[in-house]
Image (cartoon, helix red, strand yellow):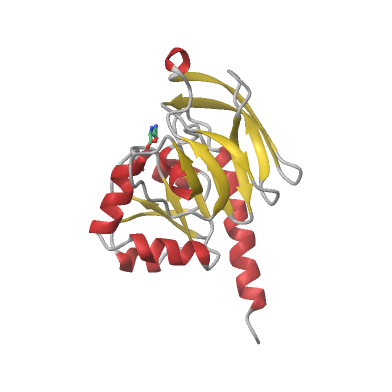
Amino acid sequence: TPTIGVLALQGDVREHLAALAAAGATAIAVRRPAELAAVDALVLPGGESTTIAKLARTFELFAPIQHRIRAGMPALGTCAGMVLLADRVVDGAVGQETFGGLDITVRRNAFGRQVASFEGEVEMAGSANAVGTVPGVFIRAPWVEEAGAGVEVLAQDPAVGRIVAVRQGPLVATAFHPEVGGDARVHSFFVDLVRASVGDTLSARPA
Ligand code: GLN
């Protein structure tokens, strides 16, 4: 069973812990570097991306998280978490920092006033893995404005058709909140990916 952390500085941490447990992972809250060191993968929750980044600096987690992501740790970012995994942000706060890792440009608070928050069915399908149609809760969500060639588009939103879910290697991000809405399939998809990646690491070890 993989141990998956949820960065627990701000945002909807409890919902992610519950969804990860429902998807069969051991889920722990991460607030300290020692906790980060104990996890196989990390979830970056929804909340406020600038606040989470600042708190990560304060709690001495920013550099360690960035380092783990660069070293191949799987991560799932939802909403603010998608912003935090993006290499580039437009319409961000001045000096907004991200952990990066995903070769995408996200537009923060991208959906205009009319659809600033909405719910709809999101069809999550990738070339390799089909998750199915899941409930999508969008709350002042970002969208993906540009995705690099190595990025797999997993979903577009049902309102205006922008890219709202992506995967690149062990990194997955959704603009919506899969932890809200009582459907753990996105988390199951991520847990499977973590299992495969942890398995790879083990089998890559010299005997
Ligand atoms: N608008 C927030 C941000 O950019 C994200 C909102 C959310 O996570 N629901 O940080």
Residue 186 appears in view = yes
Q: Nearer the viewer, residue 123 or 1?
A: 123
Q: Residue furthest right?
A: 127
Q: Where is residue 97 shown, x and y percent of the image?
A: 37, 50
Report ligand 1 position as a quadrant.
top left
Seen in the picture, residue 107 relative to 33 is either above or below; the reply is: above
Identified at 62% across, 54% down, the residue is 193
Q: Residue furthest bottom?
A: 207
Q: Where is residue 17 shown, x and y percent of the image?
A: 40, 45
Q: Where is residue 142 shown, x and y percent of the image?
A: 48, 32
Q: Nearer the viewer, residue 72 or 16?
A: 72
Q: Where is residue 2 shown, x and y percent of the image?
A: 51, 60
Identified at 69% across, 52% down, the residue is 150
Identified at 44% across, 50% down, the residue is 43
Seen in the picture, residue 24 relative to 32 is either above or below; the reply is: above
Quarter holding residue 200: bottom right
Q: In the figure, is residue 125 to the left or right of 11?
A: right
Quarter holding residue 104: top right
Q: Residue furthest front?
A: 94
The C terminus appears in which quarter of the rendering? bottom right
Residue 40 appears in view = no
Q: In the figure, is residue 108 to the left or right of 121?
A: left
Identified at 60% across, 19% down, the residue is 160
Q: In the figure, is residue 104 to the left or right of 56?
A: right
